[in-house]
Image: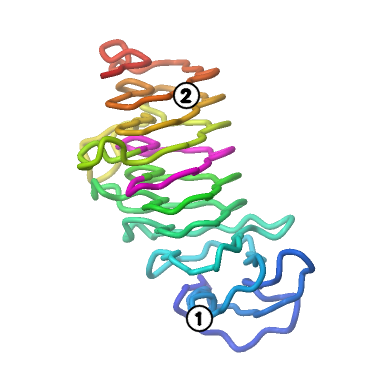
Amino acid sequence: DTFKATTIIETPPPGSEWFVLMKTDDGEVINRSNSLTDMMSYIASYSFTAPLTLELNTSEVINLAVPLNLNFNTNNYRLTIENKDGKSPVLSGQGLLSSIINSSMSHLTVRGIKLYNIKVTDNTAAFIKQTGGSSVVYEDIIVTLGNKAVYVSGGADNITFDNIKVEQVINGSFKLGNGSAAQPYDVSNLTIKNITLKDDLLGGNISGTTSKYKPLIDLAKVNGAVLENVLYSDNFSGGAVVLNNNKNIILKKILARTFGSGAAAHGILSSN
């Protein structure tokens, strides 16, 4: 049976739980559960006195009824959400949710998971929404089928995306900064590295939309960012990197191959 995040399953024997919360430094287990909803509630009420790791001990598809709203007060300790070694968990929005990770917190690391199937018809949708917060790392993540992969805004600072593979998004893979923000710069100190954007224009339109896949990286009102080792693979339309009202932006090793027709009109890099 397909696991639902809202389902409560009787307490499993130690070692078989899907979600295990432990102290990062010594591995002491704080809580075990087969309900992601229950685990999120537990973390929200927990008083952090050390870094914690939430380990996903499954390779199943976890169908989410609501996004993971990560806004915990960790008392400046780090919360890490990651796969257990040898496991490949998948978090699915079932085509219904506008995000899978909705974070406004600091001192967060998310790694080793696949994010799948959010609303493609919602222009505000993104698999990962990071609004504000600092010292946040997303790494070793696969993102497939949605409106866009990442949206960072709201004064976020010191945010890293490392080893991210994006496939089949229609409205830009990375939207970094809110170009409509009142302040001169909306986000700062971003690191975007080791990124693969594989969006097959030849696959045609996404069902229910008139849009083709676009692996665009869009920076607007960003103060300080490094984009390094980014591969655009297969066909795409539009520009690869678009810069609007930024400063201190460094681009290194940006490779694009097999262009769609839109790329000829927009170029690989456009800047205002």
Residue furthest toward the bottom?
10
> Is 25 placed left or right of 238 in the picture?
right
Query: Which image quarter: residue 78?
Result: bottom right
Q: Magenta residues?
A: 153-176
Q: Which mark is residue 3?
A: none
Front in this rendered view, residue 127 or 257: 127
Query: Which image quarter: residue 260?
Result: top left
Identify the amino acid type marked 2.
Tyr
The vertical placement of 237 against 141, above or below, is above
User: Picture coordinates of residue 199 (x, y %)?
Assistant: 42, 31
User: Picture coordinates of residue 15 (x, y %)?
Assistant: 75, 75
The vertical placement of 150 against 106, above or below, is above
Q: Secondary structure at mark 2?
A: strand
At x 28%, y 15%, the residue is 266
Q: Secondary structure at mark 1?
A: helix
**Residue tagged 2:** 232
Category of crowding for the residue at label 2, using alpha-carbon neighbours closer than 10 angstroms: few (below 14), some (14–19), many (at least 20): many
User: Picture coordinates of residue 11 (x, y %)?
Assistant: 64, 87
Magenta stretch, main secondary structure, is: strand
**Residue tagged 1:** 45
User: Picture coordinates of residue 81 (x, y %)?
Assistant: 59, 60
> Is 263 placed left or right of 116 in the picture?
left
Category of crowding for the residue at label 1, using alpha-carbon neighbours closer than 10 angstroms: few (below 14), some (14–19), many (at least 20): few
Identify the amino acid type marked 1.
Ser
The answer to if 119 sits in the magenta stretch is no
